[in-house]
Amino acid sequence: MIQIHAGGPKRPQVHVLGDFGPQAAQMIADAILATIQRTGRCRLGLAGGTTPAPVYAQLRELLPARVYPQLRVTWTDERVVDKVGHKPGDWEPFDPESNLRGAYAEWLSKVPMAPEHVLPLSLSGDVKAELLRFGKAFQEQFDGGLDIALLGLGADGHVASLFPGHPALAVDDIALAVHDSPKPPAARISLTLPVLKRAGTVIVLARGKGKAATIVRAMSGDADLPVTAFLDHPRAFFLLDAAAAQGLVTAALERMQPGA
């Protein structure tokens, strides 16, 4: 693992991981344990998609059983899909595309995580009803905030289900519905940008060369990319594999050349 400075006026901590799954999971596990030691609990927002899957598989090995009574889990966004369950622990009926199913399959179903400590963003296809249910529960169970927010990074610079140029970026609430996502499925529910920015720690995960150019743009302060909103967060960490970091490494090497 190496740490690099991305350049530009804002410099979050950027870590290039040689073994992405285990190393990212160790950093997240350390953050969870430190939060619990400091406050007695940890309110964690999970990322969806394929990037965090190897991280979740490692977290189930790294976190001791004593942690789970003090851990509260929700998601930073969810895909509104047809096949859903009826309660958090009933994960197998969920559509394979749902973020809830991914996290349960890789992690939550294999550890002593009480279903009542898990707050799904969506349990049905009724978006309006789900937003009302989630908003109320998030205030009651999470005190309206997160200690740690995990965010996957899209090649277009989106995080959670907050896409470039979308009106959702301006919403100041707990969660919102996206009905026209440029990335299928079209219907999604997402935590809002203000809620994510208020998280105690923000961890952005990115794998693959398809993200490399976007990361360079983000680190240069490109305001068109939603992920850029986290560059000035006091505890923002970008965890990248070597392919995703390729552009940053090249730029750093160029700055080291004589006369640069």
Image: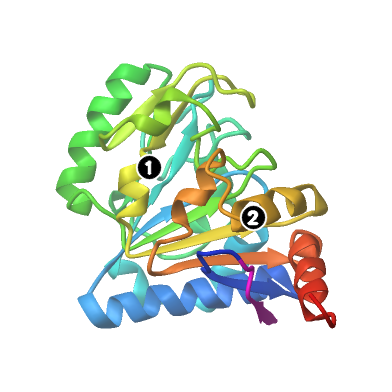
- Image vertical order of residue 174 relative to residue 206, above or below: above
State the scheme by which the image is colored: rainbow
Taking the image as shown, residue 149 lies to the left or right of residue 249, namely left
Pick the residue in front: 243 or 188: 243
Read off the residue under disc 1: 193
* Mark 2 nearby-residue class (10 Å; few <14, some 14–19, many ≥20): some
**What residue lies at 58% left-to-right and 61% top-to-bottom?**
56
Hey, which quadrant is residue 106 in on the image?
A: bottom right
User: Residue 122 appears at what percent x and percent y?
Assistant: 40, 31
Taking the image as shown, residue 18 lies to the left or right of residue 121, namely right
Marks 1 and 2: CB-CB under 8 Å? no
Residue 47 can be seen, yes or no: no
Q: Quadrant of the N terminus?
A: bottom right
Taking the image as shown, residue 114 lies to the left or right of residue 125, namely left
Q: Which residues, given as a range, are shown in magenta?
A: 1-7
Read off the residue under disc 2: 53
- Image vertical order of residue 148 relative to residue 18, above or below: above
Q: CA distance from mark 1 to mark 2?
A: 23 Å
For badge 1, the amino acid type reads Leu
Residue 3 can be seen, yes or no: yes
Taking the image as shown, residue 47 lies to the left or right of residue 72, namely right
User: Residue 2 appears at what percent x and percent y?
Assistant: 69, 82
